[in-house]
Image (cartoon, grey):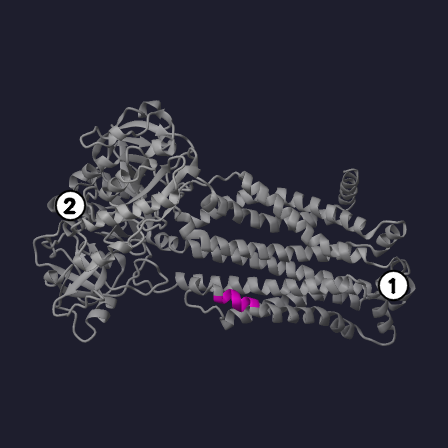
Amino acid sequence: MDVFRNDVRVALRRFVREPGFTAVVVSTLALGLGANIAIFSLIDALILRSLPVERPEELYRLGDDTDCCVNSGLQDNFSLFSYRLFEHLRANAPEFSELAGFQANTSPIGLRRSGASVSESLPGEFVTGNYFSMFGIKAAAGRLLQPDDDRAGAAPVVALSYRAWNRFGLDPSVVGSVVVVNGMPMTVVGVAGREFFGDTIRPDPAAVWIPMAQEVALRREGSLLDRADQNWLYAIGRLRPGASARQVQTRLTTALQQWLASQSFVPESARARVPQQYIALTAGGSGVPLMQAQFSRSLGMLFLTSAVLLLIASANLANLLFARADPGQTAIRTALGASGSRLIRQSLTEGMLLAIIGASLGVVAAAFATRALIALAFPAATFVPVAMTPSMSTVLFAFGLAVATGFLFTGGPAWVMSRSSPLIALSGMGRSGQGRSFVPRRSLVIAQVALSFAMLATAGLLARSLRNLEHQALGFDPADRVVLRIDPPAPLVGSVDRLASFYTQLQERLRRVPGVRDASYALYSPMEGNNWSSGVSIAGRKADPARPDSSSWNRVGPDYFTTTGTRIVGGRAIDERDAPGSRRVAVVNQAFARQFFSESDPLGQRLGIGAAAHSGDFEVVGVAEDVKYQNASQPVRPMIFFPAFQSADYADPSARNVQARSMLMRAIVVHAAGGLGGLEAAFRNAVAEIDPNVNVIRVLSMTDQVSVNFRIERLLARLTSIYGALALILASLGLYGVTAYAVAQRTREIGLRMAIGADRARVMRTVIRGPIIETAAGLAIGLPLALLAGGALKAQLYGVSGQDSKVMAATVAALLVTAAFAAAIPARRAATIDPARALRGE
């Protein structure tokens, strides 16, 4: 211990004597370590951390997928459940002390207190009455939902999150007050604890929890509660002590298969698959792993990239230590009796201390970087439940990484210098340029160039892919367009006449807002991230049972296509003639026409949603250009546009339910001069004038709506570009350092050459030749690495191959130019050496 304390004292004295060296090393380490710590902080917060609930290790989730948000039929691997199936499973799983069900996605709701004229939009979630007791959550005010609140006929109540309560100024009178939720009066019974944000780490998690029994009243005709064939719930439970997860999984799978075999909605053609249906029981302490599904690949890639950056920084610091090392001092200490192991231990101690200081600064920098990364990853979110303060696991990771990095960048130089011969060092031969440290220094520079090449090429590929995504033809014009996302109140649901009247009034009122050129409405708007699809039938087309026809579809109002800037390339658009009781018509996109009417004119053809009996429900009157509605990196899907309130006659209750839900036009599109500008308040007031219970979820420019779709690609492209630029800087510093070191070691040699006739240009060429050769060697090693990285990125690239020649050529040019500039300063210094002074000095 005394030896260690002495090593620490010696290291600290050296840091004080050499503040410039210390500052450079600590800054470089803070940069390299901070990048890794920031990405690990995100991984920890979004993927690894447990929910803030009691005993999370006891929680298990039914299913291991993140399917969302409503589906029907067989799933093979069941992760979504209808309420009826959930009740059946709960009754057949006694190993759970409690099993709670909750909505797979949050639904924006409009909530307003008595006397308020405008509803406030909050994310809501339907949950079973034992939701909070299952998680073990305590109330911050009042009480939370209980099983009695989830009975048919129970008084309508809601519970708020602490964040939602904060929007009301933490007013105690909110608890017990009556609020209007989507037009329905409900009582606030309490507020959840400050730390609890729900069952899933996601942007804008639930702020209002509603008992499952109230779903029928709030959704009316679109209710899913009694639909055994509609899966829309996740389930998490708490296993009793001693229960076997494997046995429970087997019991649940058996219960699932028995239930499916008894259900009339399972068609005869699918019953042979019932024995293959199963439920996987998975750890539920972290909730539904939505972020793992969305970000694990991207964060893994960023973590690998930041690790490469740290390797480059470590190589640069190792070169710096080689340049700093004084062979004479080492020789004197060796001559006085210091062993090689003693010298290595002293160097490692200095490296550990520098790395720990750098990691401490890196933790602080990572806290700020995490905020920036969250804002970049979730640009439209108002709240993301991610703790910005470093967790204990982050601190331990930072400490462990610091120790490993200290060994990495000090180990090599320490070992080389400990092997130096005292006689050679003291005789001055160490200045010959052929010292032990010179070969590893060149090797480190070559490694830096190779890794920098791979990082720069990766950044170039991702940046070019992002540019292709952002500048592709989407089939509509987002400029000067605004989207209002609304949720109509419950009293409107189920009445086509009331819905049609409401939207007509809203359209006319928005058109009167100054600056508005046009307005329309739709079930969903382009690049909103939504998609409705079903099986379709086409008159005169023979159905193939093995490959049934399907298509995406949407409902739109009059002037929708002109409002969104979408061209009609054949026939006509949907307009005021297409009222609820008029001739049923449809518009298809070009992809639909190519797939289903490649040899005939689509105009006049008849089609419908569902089986062949509905193939004549709608007549095609127009063809619209292809528009991307979701996933801009994929080809446009076939799509049908129906008038907003025209309906078909369905005998099947499930089809009627889907049709009723599809008539809620949640996207209001406005074409306004100058775009959103300062018109948001005017738009919200216009909606409130028509009906104050309408929940305006958000008002967003169409340009921003499109941009949100590329948030992950933008995060990857920007971070890898920053890392690539830093890698290029570090590589250039490494080249400069090695070249400057070589010039210093060869001062006598250069002076002698100039004395016997070598001119300055020749000296400069000789000096520059070394960095160029090192760069070429690094490029030769880095090119295969870059090609491998490009191949691994293939699934994430759009419109560019992983071996794009332009990107590779630009990367080669950038590194060669950087190498030339890095070598130019030492070369110029070498060319100005005075031969006489150099020889006298030697």
Name the residue type under label 1: Met
**Alpha-carbon span between mark 1 and mark 2:** 93 Å
Q: Is residue 594 above or below residue 167?
A: below
Q: How many marks?
A: 2
Residue 490: which quarter of the image?
top left
**Residue where numbered disc 2 is placed:** 499
Indicate the position of residue 29 as horizontal and vertical percent values: 64, 49
Q: Secondary structure at mark 2?
A: helix
Start and end of the magenta stretch?
785-791
**Residue where numbered disc 1 is placed:** 429
Look at 14% across and 47% down and name the residue there. Answer: 500
Q: Nearer the viewer, residue 686 or 596?
A: 596
Q: Nearer the viewer, mark 1 or mark 2?
A: 1
Mark 1 near mark 2, Cβ–Cβ under 8 Å? Answer: no
Q: Is residue 364 above or below residue 675?
A: above
Q: Nearer the viewer, residue 452 or 821?
A: 452
Few, some or many residues within 10 Å of mark 2 (<14, 14–19, 20+)? many
Q: State which quarter of the image contains the N terminus.
A: top right
